Image (cartoon, rainbow, N blue to C red):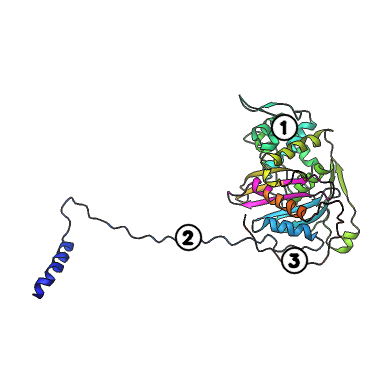
Amino acid sequence: MKGYLFAPLILVCLLQSVPPAAGQAKKVVPARKTVRRAKPAPPVDPTAGDNVDGDDLTIRRAAVTALGGMNGSVVVVDPSDGRILTIVNQKLALASGFIPCSTIKLVTSLAALSEHVVERDSLVRISRYLTLDMDTAIAHSNNEYFGVLGQKLGYDRVVRYAKMLGLGEKAGLDIPGEEPGAVPDGPPKAGGMVLETAYGEGFLVTPLELAAMLSAIANGGTLYYLQYPRAEVEGASFTPQVKRPLELAANGISDVRVGMRAAVDYGTGKSAAYDPTEPILGKTGTCTDFRVSSHMGWFGSFNEVTSHQLVVVVMLMGKSAVSGGVAAGVAGAIYRNLSEQRYFAADITRPVPMPQIITSPCCGGAR
């Protein structure tokens, strides 16, 4: 009886051991794969190593909160006198510069207007069916438009205006550790002037240099040395230092400002907007800096308020998600935070920057 009970089991074992017939493929059961998820990158602390002595701590807290855990730098300046109010990620901001991406289009615009290559309302043909004026081209950061202007200007005039606007030289006055950016040492070898005047190829620009240039556009044409008081005695004795007045067409700055306002109202920088009664003017920049193998996101800006106007420059580095639009969102969050604290109210007296105060570094945040 026991033999009958074990017979089916023996039959199954014999069948499993029989090799497949000739020409019959053996069934292969794939091995189970073990999927290992990559560990997320640790959050960046952009405040590590910063010295905050003398900073306007209200502005600094707003900038640190807005930047969160992103790898980047924020520079905030008073455009009326060139005083630096805070620098987040000072090591990065003082480095020797990065490709400015489309923020170079501000240089191209001012040069073209001043050299009467184009007028603000001139229609420039960039393709068979498309013409653009300067407002629209700045708002949407159209590369072809600025390539056309670059071809008409030529290398020499572009570089001359770039140097006038402070590129290629230190923006600050005796700021320890600051290194200058650079301007192209010759015409582009390939790609025509579009690479230089639309993408910023050949330029290296620091956040301080861009902040100094934006300050000159904000204040109507005076390029100040940026100064960074680091102690109470320096703050109390602060005296603005003019580097030079800009020799531009009478309407150059006012015309460019219209396009910068359009960029935030409906263009590439619209993520910076928060309140039409406190408009922001700005220019985005998005590209890849192959020198440092990183995507770049720039936003240079200033606000139009009756009191306590600020220049805010945001520079981000990272993977493909980094862009000028993201940088504009960081800047907008800074302006919005300060507005909610009534920082731009006329009846608020700005305190003297507080020395010898150390704040805890921000722990990072979501993009």
Which residue shows up at 85% across the image and 48% down it?
A: 80
In this view, which residue lies farthest toward the bottom?
2
N-terminal of the two: label 1 or label 3?
Answer: 1
Horizontal side, residue 286 vs residue 275: left or right: left
The disc at residue 134 is 1
> Counting other residues with Cα less than 10 Å from the Cα at mark 1, is it few (<14), some (14-19), or many (20 or more)?
many
The percent position of residue 154, horizontal first and vertical second, equals 72, 32
The percent position of residue 308, horizontal first and vertical second, equals 83, 51
Horizontal side, residue 45 vs residue 278: left or right: left
> Counting other residues with Cα less than 10 Å from the Cα at mark 2, is it few (<14), some (14-19), or many (20 or more)?
few
Which residue shows up at 73% across the image and 43% down it?
A: 282
**Which of 16/280 is in front?**
280
The residue that label 3 is drawn on is: 359
Badge 3 marks a residue whose secondary structure is loop
**Which of 33/224 is in front?**
33
Query: Does residue 55 belong to the magenta stretch?
Result: no
In this view, which residue lies farthest toward the top?
128
The percent position of residue 94, horizontal first and vertical second, equals 74, 55
Q: Is residue 88 visible?
A: no
Q: How many marks?
A: 3
Marks 2 and 3, how far apart at CA: 36 Å
Q: Is residue 55 above or below residue 125?
A: below
> Counting other residues with Cα less than 10 Å from the Cα at mark 3, is it few (<14), some (14-19), or many (20 or more)?
some
Marks 1 and 3, how far apart at CA: 43 Å
The stretch in magenta equals 300-328
Which residue shows up at 17% across the image and 66% down it?
A: 13
The residue that label 2 is drawn on is: 37
Marks 2 and 1, how far apart at CA: 48 Å
